[in-house]
Amino acid sequence: AALSDTRVGTVLAIAIGIHNIPEGLCVALPIYYATGNRVKAFSWALISGASEPLAALLGWAILANSFSDQLYAILFGLVSGMMIIISIRELLPTAHRYDFEDTVVTYSFIAGMIIMALSLVLFIV
């Protein structure tokens, strides 16, 4: 899709870039607070981030000739479903344990849903 319409590729690149910021923080911060070592935290976040494009290239090399648009749609649906389940069943209850008065969690969760919905508008523009 990105080859036929550069806007799709641009939006996808922006979405991946935005996603990588909290992902890197989620890897680096626990390591930093556990060890107090910034270099170690950064290194593990870097290794974690570098593994994704390497795995993507490996997956593409193995599966590029057998993928169809229908298979892409099925896989995207499965992955998005997994992410939603993880968010609702694991991350949200854990966040509520640390914000038991619910001063931030619910509003942040709703704001995240709104941002995701608004990002779909970028495909139309």
Image: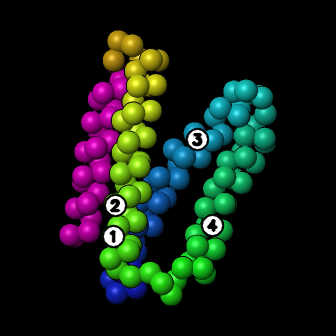
Badge 2 marks a residue whose secondary structure is helix
User: Which segment did they paint magenta?
Assistant: 103-125
Q: Name the residue type under label 3.
A: Leu
Badge 4 marks a residue whose secondary structure is helix
N-terminal of the pair, mark 4 or mark 2, is 4
Badge 1 marks a residue whose secondary structure is helix
Can you tell which mark lies on residue 25? 3
Specify whether 46 is left or right of 72.
right
Residue marked by disc 2: 77
N-terminal of the pair, mark 1 or mark 3, is 3
The vertical placement of 1 against 33, above or below, is: below
Q: Label 3 neighbourhood size at 10 Å, few (<14), some (14-19), many (20+)?
A: some
Residue marked by disc 1: 73
Q: Name the residue type under label 4.
A: Ala
Specify whether 30 is left or right of 92.
right
Q: Are marks 1 and 2 in contact (CB under 8 Å)?
A: yes
Q: Tell me residue 61's x, y (percent).
A: 60, 81
Q: Name the residue type under label 2.
A: Gly
In front: label 4 or label 1: 1
Identify the residue shown where x is 58% and y is 41%. Answer: 25
